[in-house]
């Protein structure tokens, strides 16, 4: 044979078993040979004995240089069910004598078994890909397109909106906190007025409940203390530790009134009216004193 002539090596594996699962044997062609993907044809049918048939493998190769070349023997190992042992089959080795071809420009060397014609142009070639090719209009690229710019603009806009909403929520929250602190005295006065009504009507339990609500409501709103943390221990451990001398004095007065109110509420006394008057006056005085210090 001559250079640039196509050579086809056909390997047939036949028998009974999972022929489709057999891996395609690798043929070690000389490095001077141009090789292509082998064509595999499974001719298998289902019988009472199982899958029977053959696996036909065709290898196409083209020698590009003159010389003597050897194709080593091809081995195939399988498990024989009858003898319950592995067996190995081997083909003969082949020797190819390649002479230099006469033409090197437009020589047609033959055809592969799938009837794909190979035109030899005097240089290495590859099969033309037959798969469907997706083409794009010229200039139709992602870079610079509308989708490209939206990919960057949308996250930036989303971030700006998030910052705007967060700042707005923070401002509104600050406004609510500020309003609570400013309205604390007015709310306390309203509650003390209601307590004064209960005082006049000598409704002891309702009076003390309303005074305690006025005191705790005022201190919570004025110092911006969450309801869950409102307690005398919190005032002692947090407010007194961090406060200045005036605020400490006002806070101690406030705590004394709370204790006085709780004691008078449950203490057995004959003169409830006098005790209620004292608690009411002390509550008004404590709130007024705290208001002057915080301002």
Image: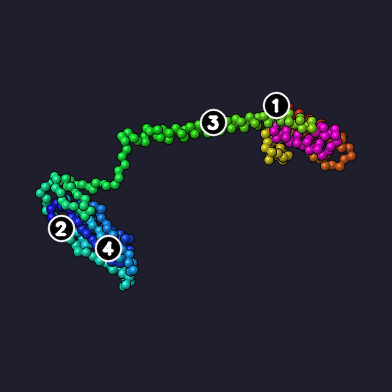
Q: Is residue 61 above or below residue 263?
A: below
Question: What span is colored magenta in the figure?
Answer: 195-222
| Within-10-Å neighbours for mark 3: few <14, some 14–19, many 20+ | few
Element under label 2?
strand
**Looking at the image, which residue is at 79% across and 30% down?**
193
Above or below: residue 226 compared with residue 48: above
Residue 205 included in the magenta stretch of the image: yes
Expressed as whole percent of the image width and height from the top left, the position of residue 134 reads: 31, 42
**Which one is in front in this view, the residue at disc 1 or the one at disc 3?**
3
Q: CA distance from mark 1 to mark 3?
A: 32 Å
120 up-or-down from 155: above or below: below
Tell which of 218 and 288 is nearer to you. 218
Q: Which residue is mark 1?
A: 295
Front: mark 1 or 4 = 4
Q: Quadrant of residue 29?
A: bottom left
Where's residue 285, x and y in %? Answer: 79, 30
* Nearest to viewer (mark 1 / mark 2): 2
Is tag 1's residue or tag 3's residue first in the polypeptide sequence? 3
Crowd tier of the residue under label 1, counting other residues whose Cα lies within 10 Å: few below 14, some 14–19, many 20 or above: few
Q: Which residue is mark 4?
A: 54
Give the residue at mark 2. Answer: 96
Earlier-in-chain disc, 2 versus 3: 2
């Amino acid at each position: 044979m001559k250079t640039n002539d196509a050579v086809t090596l056909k390997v047939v594996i036949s028998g009974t078993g999972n022929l489709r699962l057999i891996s395609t044997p690798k043929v070690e062609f000389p490095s001077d040979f141009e090789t292509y993907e082998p064509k595999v044809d499974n001719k298998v049918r289902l019988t009472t004995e199982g899958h029977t048939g053959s696996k036909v493998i065709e290898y196409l190769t083209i020698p590009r240089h003159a010389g003597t070349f050897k194709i080593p023997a091809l081995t195939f190992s399988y498990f024989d069910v009858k003898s319950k042992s592995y067996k190995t089959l081997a083909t003969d080795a082949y020797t190819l004598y390649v002479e230099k071809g006469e033409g090197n420009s437009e020589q047609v060397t033959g055809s592969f078994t799938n009837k794909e014609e190979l035109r030899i142009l005097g240089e290495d070639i590859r099969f033309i890909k037959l798969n469907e090719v997706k083409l794009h209009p010229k200039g139709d690229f992602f870079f610079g397109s509308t989708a490209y710019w939206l990919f960057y603009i949308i996250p930036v806009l989303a971030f700006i909106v998030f910052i705007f909403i967060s700042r707005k929520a923070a401002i509104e929250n600050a406004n609510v906190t500020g309003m609570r602190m400013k309205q604390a005295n007015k709310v306390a006065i309203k509650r003390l007025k209601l307590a004064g009504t209960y005082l006049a009507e000598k409704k002891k339990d309702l009076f003390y409940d309303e005074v305690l609500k006025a005191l705790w409501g005022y201190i919570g709103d004025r110092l911006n203390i969450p309801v869950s943390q409102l307690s005398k221990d919190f005032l002692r451990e947090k407010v007194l530790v961090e406060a200045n001398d005036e605020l400490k004095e006002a806070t101690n007065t406030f705590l004394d009134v709370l204790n006085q109110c709780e004691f008078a509420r449950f203490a057995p006394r004959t003169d409830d009216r006098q005790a209620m008057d004292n608690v009411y006056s002390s509550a008004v005085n404590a709130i007024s004193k705290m208001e002057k210090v915080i301002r």
